[in-house]
Image (tube, rainbow, N blue to C red):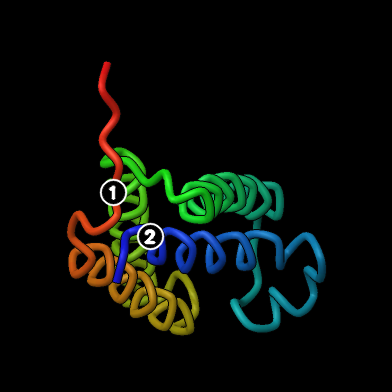
């Protein structure tokens, strides 16, 4: 598997999950649970959309740099930590553990891809 493929997969996953609450907030809340601060949900969603879009663009254009790869890995690791900690402490619904599993798979795919297809920019 090439890094561009992983970037496309993560980019699509993040873009779609980020757009979901904007398209149909009711179904998003029905699956993920009630939220106190919808403005915070939208803030996180915008960030996920932007990062997902950048990952997707890098993958489609086959211009995945080490920085793009580490953005994907670190972002997935951060969301995994949040998902697991807060789900296990009953702050968010356990459905977020499914997201954590997906994020772990993304990290493993990045690691499996290694440097296949990665570009290195010269300054």
Who's the residue at 51% across and 59% down the image?
11
Quarter of the image where one finds residue 109:
bottom left
Please state if 64 lies on the left or on the right of 11 as rendered: left
Assess disc 2: are there few (<14), some (14-19) or many (≥20) residues with their C-alpha within 10 Å of its C-alpha: some
* Mark nearer the viewer, 2 or 1: 1
**Distance from label 2 to label 1 (Cα)?**
24 Å
Q: Of residues 58 and 12, which is closer to you in this image? A: 58
For the C terminus, the image quarter is top left
Q: Earlier in the sequence, mark 2 or mark 1?
A: 2
Q: Of residues 9 and 85, which is closer to you in this image? A: 9
- Residue 18 picture location, percent across and down: 63, 60
> Do the CB atoms of the residues marked 2 and 1 lie less than 8 Å apart?
no
Who's the residue at 19% across and 64% down the image?
111
User: How many numbered marks are there?
Assistant: 2
Who's the residue at 53% across and 45% down the image?
54
Tell me, for residue 79, which label it has, or none.
Answer: 2
Q: Secondary structure at mark 1?
A: loop
Q: In the rendered view, would you say 98 is above or below 112?
A: below
Tell me, for residue 82, which label it has, or none.
Answer: none
Q: In the rendered view, would you say 120 is above or below 71?
A: above
Q: Secondary structure at mark 2?
A: helix
Q: In the rendered view, would you say 21 is above or below 44?
A: below
Who's the residue at 36% across and 61% down the image?
82
Tell me, for residue 118, which label it has, or none.
Answer: 1
Please state if 68 lies on the left or on the right of 20 as rendered: left
- Residue 85 picture location, percent across and down: 30, 67
- Residue 95 picture location, percent across and down: 48, 83
Q: Residue furthest top?
A: 123
For the N terminus, the image quarter is bottom left
Assess disc 1: are there few (<14), some (14-19) or many (≥20) residues with their C-alpha within 10 Å of its C-alpha: some
């Amino acid at each position: 598997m090439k890094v561009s493929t992983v970037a496309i997969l993560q980019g699509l996953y993040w873009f779609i999950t980020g757009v979901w609450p904007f398209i149909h907030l009711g179904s998003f809340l029905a699956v993920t649970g009630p939220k106190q601060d919808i403005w915070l949900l939208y803030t996180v969603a915008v960030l996920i959309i932007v990062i997902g879009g950048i990952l997707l663009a890098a993958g489609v254009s086959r211009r995945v740099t080490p920085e793009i790869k580490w953005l994907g890995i670190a972002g997935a690791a951060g969301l995994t930590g949040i998902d697991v900690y807060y789900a296990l402490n009953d702050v968010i619904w356990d459905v977020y553990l499914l997201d954590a599993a997906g994020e772990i798979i993304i990290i493993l795919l990045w690691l499996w891809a290694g440097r296949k297809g990665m570009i290195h920019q010269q300054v």
